Image (tube, rainbow, N blue to C red):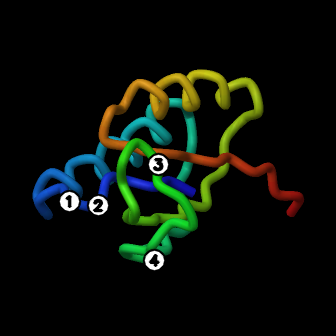
């Protein structure tokens, strides 16, 4: 799950989404599903924002590729928060 800053213009937000997918695929990942939740209000403010744009990605990759993915997501200033969860399939 990724939470993007809510007030970005659509073209910038779509660029961020493309960059996330590009990052996942660069690290030998394969995006299997994308679920856009849209803007949601927070229970508390994050970096002075009271809402964020939520997107859930399901992807497959090797476990040794998680660190580079996390590093890339942390360095993107348009992402407020992200969470990676390992799924057993």
Residue on which disc 3 sits: 46
- Residue pictured at 48% horizontal, 29% vertical: 74
The quarter of the picture where residue 58 lies is bottom right
Label 1 and label 4: CA atoms lie apart by 15 Å
Crowd tier of the residue under label 2, counting other residues whose Cα lies within 10 Å: few below 14, some 14–19, many 20 or above: many
Label 3 and label 1: CA atoms lie apart by 13 Å
Q: Which mark is residue 6?
A: 2
Label 2 and label 1: CA atoms lie apart by 4 Å
In what element is the residue under mark 3?
A: strand
- The residue mark sitting in front, 2 or 3, is 3
Do the residues bearing badges 2 and 1 touch, measured as CB atoms within 8 Å? yes
* Quadrant for the C terminus in the image: bottom right
Q: Which mark is residue 37?
A: 4
Query: In this image, 14 relative to 71: left or right?
Result: left
Query: In this image, 48 relative to 42: left or right?
Result: left
Q: In x, y percent, where is residue 17?
A: 32, 53
Count of labels in the image: 4
Of callouts 4 and 3, the N-terminal one: 4
Residue on which disc 1 sits: 7
Label 4 and label 3: CA atoms lie apart by 18 Å
């Amino acid at each position: 799950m990724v939470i993007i800053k809510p007030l970005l213009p659509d073209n910038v937000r779509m660029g961020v989404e493309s960059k996330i997918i590009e990052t996942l695929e660069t690290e030998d990942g394969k995006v299997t599903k994308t679920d856009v939740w849209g803007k949601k209000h927070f229970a508390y403010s994050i970096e002075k924002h009271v809402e964020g744009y939520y997107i859930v990605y399901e992807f497959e990759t090797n476990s040794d590729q998680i660190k580079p993915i996390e590093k890339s997501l942390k360095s993107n200033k348009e992402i407020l928060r992200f969470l990676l969860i390992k799924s057993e399939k």
